[in-house]
Every structure is written in C-alpha cells, then in structure tokens.
Amino acid sequence: MRTDNGDTSDFLEDISDVPVIEEPLEYSDIESNLAARNKKQRDFEEYLKSVSSDSTDSSQENADNGVGSGDGSDTGAAHPKRSPIRRKLSSVREEIRGSSLGRFLFGYDKQANALAESSVGKAVDRHEQPKGATRFFYMLDNGIISKIMQNTIYRLLSLSAKYYGIMLVAYAIVSSALYIFDFAVIDFSTTVNIFYFIYGMCAMILATFLVTSDRSLSGAFSESRVIRAVFVSFLGYRLTDTEAHTPVRTRALYAAIFSVMGALLGLFTVFVSAHIVWLVVLVFIFLLLSFSSPEFCFNFTVLILPFTVFFARKTLPIAVLTGLCGLCYLRKLMLRKRSFAFEPIDFYVLMFAIIYFLSGITSIGGEPAFGESIILLVLLCGYFLAANLLKSERNLVSICKVISLSAFIVSAVGIVEFFTGRAEVRWLDTAIFGTENGRIVSLFSNSNVLAMYLIFTLPFVIGEINKSVRPIALIPRLFNLVAVIAAIGLTQSRAGYLALIFSVVAMLFFKRRRGMRRIIVAFAIVPYIILLLPSFILTRFDSIFSSAFDTSVSYRIQIWQGAIRMISDYLFIGIGGGSSSFASVYPDYATAGAESAIHLHNIFLQCFVETGIFGITVFILLLFVFVQMNTSKLPDLKLASIRYARYASFISVMALIVFGATDYIWYDRRLFFLFFVAIGICTAARRFTKEQSITADAEHNAQSKQLKVDSSI
C-alpha cells in the first residue's frame, strides 16, 4: 500500500496497532529545517527563563493579556514594580475568581477534563476510532483502482517539468494562431474569441517557469519559492505527496509526444470551449491537491467565499467545497494521518447542529426547508474542520492571511463602486439622509451583509498589523486596515459602526501589554479622525442616538413585535429553519406596515422562532461556553501569531453578535459558515497553545532530570 509519503508497507492485520501519525509540516529544504530547529530552541530557552522568574510577575503578565487570565496563582500581594492601582486591581481580580461568576468564567478546563474522562470522551478518543472503518479505508486505499491512480500520478509527477513546459508552449502557439487566423482571415466568432489569445499567453508564461527547470514536476512544485509562498505559506498545503522525485531521463520521443499533445489540445478548443478545457484541468489539479491536503481545500474555500456571488446559488459552492474538504479529512482521519479532538465547545456545536437539522425536518416550509437544513448542516461542519485541521502555527497564520486578503479585495471593490457612482440608495431613508451618497454592496447583495463580512474580517486585519515587525511588511497591512475601515464607513450600516468601535477597542484591550493605555490614546485621537470623516457618514452615525426614529428603526420595532407573537405560539419547536417557513408563517403575525419582512433583524429572535426554546437555549449556552473557553487561563508561550489568531477569532464572533442585535447575521448563509469557522479557529488556537505548553513542560522536566543526573555524576 502506498502512503501519502510514497512508502509502501504490508497491510496491517490489527488496525488497533496503527498509531496516529500526523504528516510532517516542515519543508524539504535544509534552510527551513534549520530555521525551525532554531526557532524551537529559542522558544524553549524563553520558556526556561519564564519558569525561573518570579511567579507574581507571571501572574501579572497573564492578567495584562485580558483573555489569557484565569485561575492563576496571583494573590495580589505587594510587588515593588506595581503601582497601588495595579495592586488594587489584582485583589479585585482575585475576588472575582473566587466568586461563582469567576468559577464559571475560568472553569472551562474542569469541564474539558470531566468530558475527557467520561464515556463520550473516551469513545471519540483517537485511539478508539472504529476499527472496521479504519480497516475499510486501508483496503480502499490499497485497492486495484487506487493503486492504478497512485502509480499514474506518481509517474506523471516524476516526469521532467520541461515536458509540461513544451506541451504548454505548443498549446499557446496553436491557441494564439487560431485567434489571429480568425481575426485576420475568417469569422469563427461562435467558437474562437479573445479568450483563446488570453489562455495562450497564460500558458506561455507558465511554460517559461517549467521549460527552464531541471527538476521533475513534483520537484518544481515543492522546491519553488513562489509556489511554496502561495500554496504552502498562504493556502496551507502540506508538502508530503509531492516529494522531489528523480526526473526521468530527457528523451526526444517524450518531447515530441508532449508537443503533439499540446497542439491537439489547442485544436480541440475549436470544438469545445476553451473555458471548459481549462476548467477541467484546474478542477483535476484542485482535487488532487485537496485529497493530498484537506487544509488546502479549507483555506481555498474561505478565500473564494465572497466570489460565489457570481453563482446563481451563492451558498451551494461553499457547501460543496466544505463537503469535499470533510471527505478528504475523513479519509485522512480513518487512515490515522489526522486526529480528532472532542471537548465541551464541540459538544454544544454538535447539539446546535442536530437541533437545526431537526428543525428543517419538522419545518412548516416543507421540502425546500429540508434541503436548506442539509446545506446548513454541511456548512456547520466548517467548525469541526477548522478546529481539527488548523493544528499548527503555520496553518493558523495562513488562514488569517487568507481572511485578510479576502477582506482587502472586497473592500477595494466596494471603494471603487462608491467612487464610480454605483452605490445604491434603496436602503436609505432618503427623506432624512438624501440621495447624493448611496451605500456600497461590493461582492454581496446587501450593504448590511457587506458590513457583517467586513466586521468579521476586521480583527484579523488588525491582528496582522500587530504581528508585523518590519516596516516593509507593515505598510501594506496598514493600507489594508484603512481600506477595510473605509469600506465599513461607506456601507453606512449603523450596526456596523457600533461593531467597528467594539472590535477596535477589544483588539486594543487584548494587546499583550499596555492595552488600556492604547485605548486612552485611541479615544484621544478620535476628535481628529471625526474632522476627516465625510458629512454623510457623521450624519448616519449621529442618527443612532437621535430621538427621532427613521423608517428602518421603526420598521425593525414593528418586526420584533410580530416576532414576540410568533414565539408565543411556537414556543417549543419553532416554525423550522429555512426562508420558506418564515415566509409562510410571518405574514399572519406581522404588524401593519412590516408585512414584507424576510427575517426578524435579530439573531436571537430569529433563532428562537426557527428552533424554539430548545434551540435558543443551546445557542446561548454555546456562546457562554465560547466566552468561558477564552477567559480560562492558558500558559503564555510568547507566540504572537497564535495569540492574535485566537483573539481575532474571538472578537470576530463577539462583534457579529453585537451586529446581530439589530440584524440577522445568518441571512446570508456564507456568514453562517464564517461564524462557526471563527469559533473553530479560536478552538484550534487554544488547543495548539495547550499542546505546546504540555510539550514544553515535558521537555523542561526531561531537561531538569538530565541536569540532576549530570550534577550527581
């Protein structure tokens, strides 16, 4: 059987003896290995310094972190470096920790340990995976069809990259010749167009990198700095299935065969659209990369999420990609090349998924609501994928980069939309705000939905700035932050403005040190920022605190009144999920003037109406446990990238909840997916920190024992 590393081994009779072996994350080149070892050595030395320092200093440092403070050993005793105010705050923290509220906020680890010792926790332990399923996947992976596919892919990857470059050159020549011939001689407008020339030029550019390479195709892929930067560092691909094979000796016959293949492929586009040809090739490459590394598929799904607006059903592509990623992860899990963890937050997410799915089955909306519940169930799997696939610092950093880049593209499109006069005014009360400046929608169908997406991405963008140390890297990230904040302002979403303030203040507060000082400085410069804001944004923000309600505010109040009447009649099981259920029931309870509402403009009311008292209870408990997970104490490993990934995902979820007080944040199901992905990222970052602390403790104990042995000798 060929494994993901290219090795072959006999089929193991006893599947229970197969250990869980995570695929290596390091690169194949020597420089990366040396850098990784040096980094681990530095981290270990810093850890040794931290454990040898005074325990009171350590407790104070954790307290300054905000989220990272919990059940510590800080007793609030006097310290020569502490001011009286800090000593007083320390004593207040100790009183809070000793209270019932403190035990709740800082008691997540106790719940996790209790769940791990229970029968449920042991049943999902990685050493107790279903042996039959594992055996089946081993047999399937070792079957005849699988062997043929693996051998074929192995041979294709072992061929010299020059052959593929020659094939692309031949394709580019034929494709460009077809376009020129059509343009100059005859009219093949039904089959030949400008895309022939564009695809030909793209093939020629790609061919220049391949023709000049002396490596095999796998070697060119795994050892190229550009490809590693895009696929590995950015999209989270694991370089395990693409080790640098020794290229087959160059032969003239092979070069001729690949030249003919490229020419025939170019001629074939006369009968089949060039779009389809390239799409088939790209889909094949994508499937190959996804089955090799589910992390790549997951990052790619998050990256293209805003661009699914060009599909008729914009949620369906995300559901398909999530399902594909889940299958790829399940295959790796059953082959024991990935692991699965289960803790309290997973339990509540699972319970909420089951309730939401059952609400689709019992929905008043019938078959359409049931189909939508299946899609929501698949999208909710994004949490489990994020929590179990993002198991390394590199994967957590890559997903933050993906979210930040998507935010920049969406913001840039929205800003261009505003300055080209395409912003829309249909969501404005024109009697109050006028018609001169509309609201941007960018790649989303609604300005409020766009604001939700940007609010979700904002903490990740701020986190990227906090991680920067070099000025050359800080400039584009600051530019990205300005673009995102400007786009939020141009949405003219008042809930977005409040969530923006919450996100910025929260990220400043969770800064490692001097968070409160940064907040004071930020508020001090607010008056100067206000002077730079356009008048229509100030007018829109001022209307939040105005005593006179505009039509959108009064409209929401009328909708909420109808929602309360619906809850009284559907208290226990709700009306069921899906827009069809709401559309069929709400008109009977609507207040005059608000009959056309498509949702309740409140996340809690909408969840209550759809899933009943059981669904809203589980959802509130999920949020409580999520907050508890982030307020419980964790060791500080001084990894800024992990800390900001955790803080950013936590603040993203809480900012969306703030937004959800006046809007239904899951109306666009893509935001439903991102909401639970953010919870999964936070869970993954916490698990990584905890596992690294355990490893550091073990190394420290081993080091201490060795020092004792050496000293005794």
Image (spheres, helix red, strand yellow):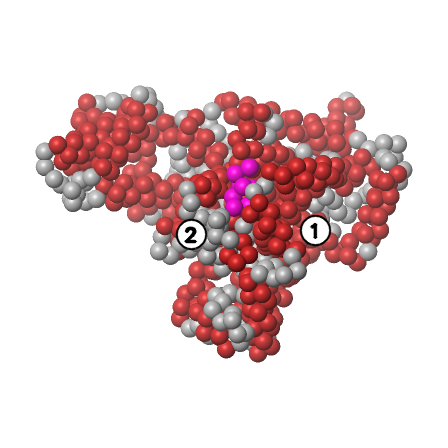
Label the magenta part by its dominant secondary structure: helix
Disc 1 secondary structure class: helix
Q: Which mark is drawn over residue 497? A: none
> Which residue occupies 63% across, 66% down?
617
Disc 2 secondary structure class: helix
User: Looking at this view, is 52 or 425 the one in front?
Assistant: 425
> Which residue occupies 17% across, 27% down?
256
Q: Is 543 left, or right, of 48 in this rendering?
A: left
> Which residue occupies 67% across, 48% down?
630
Q: Up-down: is 319 above or below 2?
A: below
Q: Which residues are magenta?
A: 482-490
According to the picture, the residue beneath numbered tag 1 turns out to be: 109
According to the picture, the residue beneath numbered tag 2 turns out to be: 318
Q: Is 702 left, or right, of 225 in this rendering?
A: right
Q: CA distance from mark 2 to mark 1?
A: 33 Å
Residue 498: x and y in percent read 62, 51
Could you tell which of marks 2 and 1 lies nearer the N-terminus?
A: 1
Residue 97: x and y in percent read 80, 51
Q: Is residue 634 visible?
A: no
